[in-house]
Image (spheres, rainbow, N blue to C red):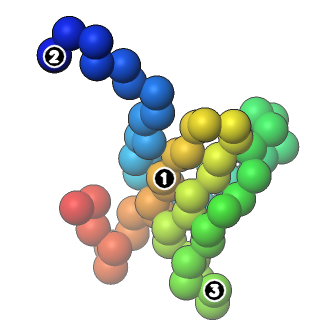
Amino acid sequence: MAKGTKLERIYPFFTMDDLAESVDFYNQKLGFETDLLIPDNDPFFAIVSRANVRILLKRITEHIPNT
C-alpha cells in the first residue's frame, strides 16, 4: 500500500439463506437502515447502512447461485 493511503470505507458482501431474517437482524439489533431491497416481489439482494458502513446482502437459492 502506498504511503499516506487511508481507507475510510469498506462495503462487505455477505451471502445467506434467509435475506429477510438477515435484514431484520441488521436493522433491529445493530441499528442499520435498509437502503435497497430488490426485486420488490421476492427480494434476493439488499443493502443496509449505518453511518459510513454499507453491507451488501444476497440470498442464495437453487435459482440464485453464489456468484
Q: Which residue is pictured at 39% across the width and 63% down the height?
A: 60
Q: Amino acid at mark 3?
A: Asp
What residue does disc 2 label? 1
Above/below status of 51 relative to 17: above
Say whether disc 3 or disc 2 marks the residue closer to the N-terminus.
Answer: 2
What residue does disc 3 label? 40
Q: Is residue 61 left or right of residue 40?
A: left
**Residue 21 occupies which quadrant of the picture?**
bottom right
Q: Which residue is pictured at 58% across the width and 37% down the height?
A: 53
Per the rendering, the mark at residue 56 is 1
Q: Is residue 22 left or right of residue 15?
A: right
Q: Which residue is pictured at 70% across the width and 40% down the height?
A: 50
- The label nearer to you, 1 versus 2, is 2
Q: Is residue 43 left or right of residue 21?
A: left
> Could you tell me which quadrant the C terminus lies in?
bottom left
Closer to us: 35 or 26: 35
